[in-house]
Amino acid sequence: MKLHEHIQRHMNLVSRYGPAGIEVNGMNHARPLILAPGFIHADWIAGPEQLTPESLAPLWPLDPRVVLVGATGVAVAGLKSLRSFLATRQVALEVMDLGAACRTYNVLAQEERQVVALLFPS
């Protein structure tokens, strides 16, 4: 699904997502990635079931206030310990399907919020 026409070069925005991956500013990513307005990290874990406090180490220099997890079929109950861990750092965790996470990320990034998206294409 195509999300927007205009690409802001100074900010990472999702321009499209689907079975082939996630397109950020015209570049396709077929593997899971960490996405923030000024940061992309694609050499990361294989799936959301591998999310642990240790796997979130690349996020801390970004000082996020909101972390979005976007994937198909993520078990929210399985992320309860991760939610508790993030709460101790005063970071909100929102889990949703991939499309909703991409759209929500774009809105929050354009509002200049401290958002990081953990995106897991199928």
Image (cartoon, rainbow, N blue to C red):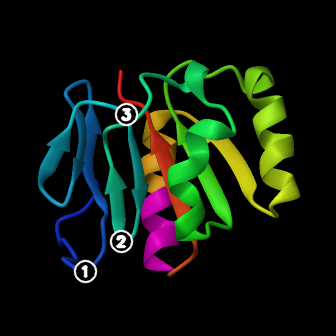
Left or right: 97 in relation to 102: right
Three-letter code for the amino acid on which mark 2 is drawn: Gly
Residues under numbered marks 2 and 3 in contact, where contact means CB atoms less than 8 Å apart: no
Three-letter code for the amino acid on which mark 3 is drawn: Pro
Query: Where residue 30 sits: x, y (%)?
Result: 23, 31
Say whether residue 81 is visible: yes
Q: How many marks?
A: 3
Mark 1 residue element: loop
Residue at which label 1 appears: 10
Three-letter code for the amino acid on which mark 1 is drawn: His
Q: Earlier in the sequence, mark 1 or mark 3?
A: 1
Residue at which label 3 appears: 32
Q: CA distance from mark 2 to mark 1?
A: 7 Å
The local crowd at label 3, few if under 14, some if 14 to 19, many if 20 or more residues have their Cα within 10 Å, is many
Eyeballing the image, is 99 above or below 18? below
Q: From the image, give the main secondary structure of the stretch colored magenta.
A: helix
Left or right: 66 in relation to 113: right
Q: CA distance from mark 1 to mark 3?
A: 22 Å
Residue at which label 2 appears: 38
Q: What residue range appears in magenta?
A: 104-111
Eyeballing the image, is 111 above or below 5? below
